[in-house]
């Protein structure tokens, strides 16, 4: 989202808006040098914002990202500032849905606090449906869809087959399903394993556990942990497929990035994934947690029974660009 924030800030300023940014537990680095950023010190960004803006100024428009919806924060915001409030929902939901108690709490919060939010934004059709299911169908008239987008020009296009080379770009936590991928690779026939090379880019709390599993199954020749890298836009072109065995997703930027590099995707039908990935056209889909199915797909790719020969980056350039995302978010502002 970093590039979106910068591009959006510039677009707002061109429209005559002054923009302040409030980040929670985030380091201000040179990437944000042209943004007016306030970083919270050990408190939530919402609380910092309320304290900072109480006596200094009244904001005409307040936009929230990665903030829980329908909470007392929005009531305070509306009552104290009379701002036009836009709440953008980036939050994935659990594979098997929310617990009953949380569902009931969300319904109640929807009744109590949704009236203080002027516009709800889902970043996928899946997210829009979740907002309506979680907080009430009465929000339909003020809930809009604006897809996430990426700066497509950054991604070098894959031009060769790169047979057997696959990539994972993911935070290493349980919900991303990397443990399933390791199990799936272990199930491959030995004669096909030799053709497979998977590089995993990312860090997270499960890294040591995943590394131990790779060692346990003697898969060091197939799976390598590469850590985090800022060079992914250039590296993606070196691979034949992106692997994303995730259990939870809202709208995956990793999928957009992979397709922008003309690299098809093997993933699960969670969140907004089916809104981008079409079976056999730009990727392959398997049910989350179905290790044997994932193993079978990888095996068929290695046997060249599953192939995707056509370019898969045109859709991303046309419909999921950063420029289009910024334009659609600017349209949400009143009086634009």
Image (cartoon, helix red, strand yellow):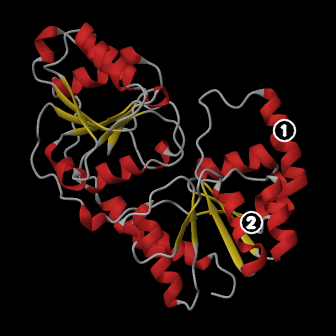
Residue displayed at 37% across by 53% down: 256
Q: Residue 322 appears at what percent x and percent y?
A: 41, 68
What residue is pinned by disc 2?
50
Q: Is residue 319 left or right of residue 147?
A: left
Disc 1 secondary structure class? helix
Q: Measure the C-alpha gap from mark 1 to mark 2.
A: 24 Å
Describe residue 31's horizontal placement relative to residue 290 as left or right: left
Whole-percent x and y of residue 58? 75, 81
Q: For this rendering, which residue is in front, 296 or 251?
A: 251
Tell me: residue 231, above or below residue 213. Answer: below
Residue 237 visible in the snapshot: yes
Name the mark nearer the viewer: 1 or 2: 2
Residue at horizontal 39 percent and vertical 32 percent from the top: 172
Residue 134 falls in image quadrant = top right
Please report whichever mark, 1 or 2, sits nearer to the chain's N-terminal start.
2
> In this rendering, does residue 320 appear at all?
no
In the displayed image of the protein, which residue is found farthest to the front?
A: 41
Q: Nearer the viewer, residue 192 or 175?
A: 175
Identify the residue at image location x=64%, y=26%: 96
Q: Is residue 236 above or below residue 324?
A: above
Q: Residues within 10 Å of mark 1 (few under 14, many from 20)?
A: few
Secondary element under disc 2, as helix, strand or loop, is: helix
Q: Which residue is mark 1?
A: 105
State left or right for residue 69 relative to residue 180: right
Give the quarter of the figure containing the C terminus: bottom right
């Amino acid at each position: 989202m970093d590039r979106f924030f910068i591009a959006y800030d510039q677009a707002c300023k061109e429209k005559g808006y002054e923009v302040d940014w409030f980040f929670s537990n985030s380091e201000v680095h040179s990437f944000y040098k042209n943004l007016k950023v306030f970083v919270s010190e050990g408190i939530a960004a919402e609380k910092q914002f309320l304290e900072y803006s109480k006596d200094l100024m009244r904001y005409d428009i307040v936009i929230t990202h990665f903030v829980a919806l329908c909470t007392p924060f929005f009531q305070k915001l509306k009552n104290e500032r009379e701002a036009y409030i836009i709440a953008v929902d980036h939050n994935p939901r659990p594979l098997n849905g929310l617990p009953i108690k949380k569902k009931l709490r969300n319904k109640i919060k929807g009744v109590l606090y949704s009236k203080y939010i002027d516009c709800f934004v889902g970043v996928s059709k899946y997210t829009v449906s979740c907002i309506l299911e979680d907080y009430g169908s009465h929000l339909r008239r003020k809930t809009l869809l604006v897809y996430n987008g990426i700066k497509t020009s950054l991604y070098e296009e894959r031009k060769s087959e790169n047979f057997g080379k696959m990539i994972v770009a993911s935070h290493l936590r349980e919900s991303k399903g990397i443990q399933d991928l390791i199990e799936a690779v272990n199930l491959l026939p030995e004669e096909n394993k030799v053709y497979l090379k998977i590089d995993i880019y990312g860090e997270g709390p499960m890294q040591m556990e995943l590394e131990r599993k790779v060692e346990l199954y003697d898969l060091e020749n197939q799976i390598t942990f590469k850590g985090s890298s800022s060079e992914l836009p250039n590296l993606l072109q070196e691979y034949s497929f992106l692997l994303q065995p995730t259990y939870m997703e809202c709208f995956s930027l990793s999928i957009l990035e992979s397709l922008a590099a003309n690299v098809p995707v093997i993933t699960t039908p969670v969140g907004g994934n089916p809104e981008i990935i079409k079976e056999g056209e730009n990727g392959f889909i398997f049910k989350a947690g179905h290790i044997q199915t994932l193993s079978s797909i990888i095996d068929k790719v290695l046997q060249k029974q599953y192939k995707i020969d056509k370019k898969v980056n045109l859709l991303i350039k046309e419909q999921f660009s950063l420029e289009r995302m910024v334009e659609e978010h600017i349209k949400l502002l009143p009086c634009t």
